[in-house]
Amino acid sequence: MPDRTESESRKLLGRLRAAMAESSAGQARLDRIVRLIAESMGCEVCSVYLFRDPETLELCATVGLKSEAVHKTRMRLGEGLVGRTARDRQVINSANAPGERGFRYMPETGEERFSSFCGVPIQRLGEALGVLVVQSRAARVYTPDEVYALEVVAMVLAEMTELGAFTGGEGGLSPRHQRPITFRGLSGQEGAVSGCVFLHEPRVVVTNPISEDPDKELARLAAAIDALRAQVDAMLAGNGVMDGEEIAVLEAYRMFANSRSWLRRMEEDVRSGLSAEAAVEKEQSHARARMGQAGDAYLRDRLHDLDDLSNRLLRILTGQGRDTGAAMPEDPILVARNIGPGELLEYGKGTLRGIVLEEGSVGSHAAIVARAWAIPLVIRADGIVAEALNGDLVLVDGEQGVAHLRPDDAVRKAFEDKIAMLARAQERYADLRDLPATALCGTTVSLHMNAGLMADLPSLPSSGAEGVGLFRTELQFLVRNQMPKRAELSALYARVMDAARGKRVAFRTLDIGSDKVLSYMKPQDEPNPAMGWRAIRLGLDKPGVLRMQLQALIRAASGRPLSVMFPFIANPGEFRQARAEFDKAMDRERILGHPLPSSIEVGAMLETPSLAFASYTFFREVDFLSVGGNDLKQFFFAADRENERVRRRYDMLESPFLELLSGIVQRCASAGTPLSFCGEDAGRPVEAVALAAMGFRTLSMRPASIGPVKSLIRRVDLKEARKVIDAARIRGDESVRPALTDWLARQP
Ligand code: PEP
Ligand code: MG
């Protein structure tokens, strides 16, 4: 690498700093910058093209081309050499531009046939924002030092664009992060809400891309690197609880953190005039651009490591980050790439007004938490993390799975109307609160709510639920950073029962594993965790925690009725073993002289198809059964409930699944075993009608669904619904949904 101590880039940045310090408006400033670059590099043309929309670039400033073309000349992504630079995010440096593939002559710009062309992508964190171009008559290839200088300037331009430096440009080009954008994803939870963006992992904003004093910046960079290495070392030192895989990841981290070439490149950038954070970001941008192109999974992973380290370094340098970052707005809408249930629970119920995720799936436990909190959730809002800034207005339409970021007035108005309409529907549901879910045929369905946190219990009276049909005890474990003690658990379960005021609460023992990972338990390296060592399997193999939990439940009940159910029972033997643990726990409590529950019922969750075909003996043995439709559907259709691509192909109302349910209903009926359904489908009105028509008399759902489900059940005759379902099945309809929804639409 050439010694750039007194290089082109350093000189150029020195002059650029002066231009940035001026108080001129965005456009004037941009004009001055292109002039400065052309002068410094001795070329006839210097232009800046920025994205007008993701597919279109617009000439925003130029020296050397006709000034009338500014904000008029546009080109599509990939079109001409400029479009190609933007699309491929790679420098094009050619002494014979007209001879290059894709060259496009643009007469409207007054462009002569310039021989040489050098286009450098303007990008921030791997995202293309535009292109910086220099052209000259003489056939020349720009030297590596000149190209480097242009890259550094492009980096600074990227930051300036980010900061809205060109706001107010005469051409009316909205700067990035100011224009309205609509993200069309999927609905994770219904409802409509407006609020302000709160980024789960806020982006670091670099406010000082150009340094005044390279030595000072080098010292800052060195200190930050030391702090980063110390962080990584500390992570490795705490590796007692990690397995080989995690250690390997951290070793790779450490290798990068100590990488001489990474550091050297950043030091070069600082010497050439960038601030320490801008240098880190420049490296990160390179890594991200490469990540997008890397076909090799291993290389992508390593680039990810580098990306992560760069983020850490930026947080150290800027003091911004999750802990020290922006204050939460009053009406926060959480925006994140993805979030685990534990992280989400840390925010606490009542804190967030809505959630928008880039990834995520309807079946994930984070989505279930959002549903329990009854806040709108949009998933698969591709690209929102890069577009949203903390504090931006965002309208979350959980009905349609759409998020409107920085909406214009028309969208805002339409959205207000929608919120008002939904509020009116809520009022109607509130009127039904104390009425039973009795259908026109006289059948009453008992509606219960799903819960998992103390904070859910206040919804019990307000939702009109008759009890808690599923209490997911693992949520309590997920919100902590260490294993709770028995006394704590017992006190907590007692509080849950107190809050339920005599209404039934079906406590499900720990369902850990799959996507529910406890930070304080050794993670398992399993190829298919959803089908792995989870729930009761873990509970029976390592019974310490199960025993503690059972004891805590028995003590909490103390003189009150107790309902316990075991998750993920795949065969009767597992239930028998778990039941034996419960009986032993009861014996111990009896011997210790502790007061016992006034009555007990011990049930199982039916979540694997195998259990649906268990013997009648088993069906008689359990005190009750609860169908966990989320897992049952996942295993019946062999479709990962968290994988949106496959999950949505299948429907609970498909005839074979109803066949399975009908077998379960029939076995329970002949064994006299109480049966309920507690998967997410129970909370969807059409599905709930189908379940009730099939013979389920107890449905457990998120509290917000009780109103809509009750409202629909009260309007239909379940016997008639059953006839419609049976006719569809006999006809051989793949799904009964079309027939059922058609029939429902004809009901008064
Ligand atoms: C289910 O699988 O349907 C269920 C209720 O359990 P969870 O969603 O917690 O796995
Ligand atoms: Mg389950």
Image (cartoon, helix red, strand yellow):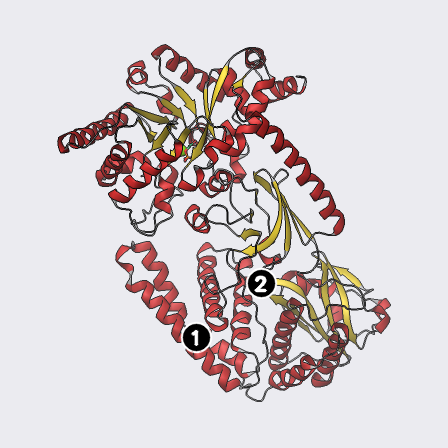
| Residue 475, percent from left and from top | 38, 42
| Residue 3, percent from left and from top | 53, 86
| Residue 310, percent from left and from top | 48, 67
Q: Secondary structure at mark 2?
A: loop
* Mark 2 lies on residue: 126
Relative height, residue 575 to residue 331 (above, below): above
Left or right of 447, for residue 48: right
The answer to which of marks 2 and 1 sits earlier in the sequence is: 2
Q: Nearer the viewer, mark 2 or mark 1?
A: 1
Q: Nearer the viewer, residue 256 or 727?
A: 727
Left or right of 510, for residue 744: right
* Mark 1 lies on residue: 224
Label 2, label 1: how far apart the Cα atoms are: 23 Å
Q: Secondary structure at mark 1?
A: helix
Relative height, residue 606 to residue 12 (above, below): above
Q: Estimate how packed mark 2 is, as few (under 14), some (14 to 19) or many (20 or more) residues with alpha carbons within 10 Å.
A: many
Q: Nearer the viewer, residue 483 or 606?
A: 483
**Quarter assignment of residue 25:** bottom right
Visible in this render: residue 534? no
Residue visible at 50% across and 76% down in the picture? 266
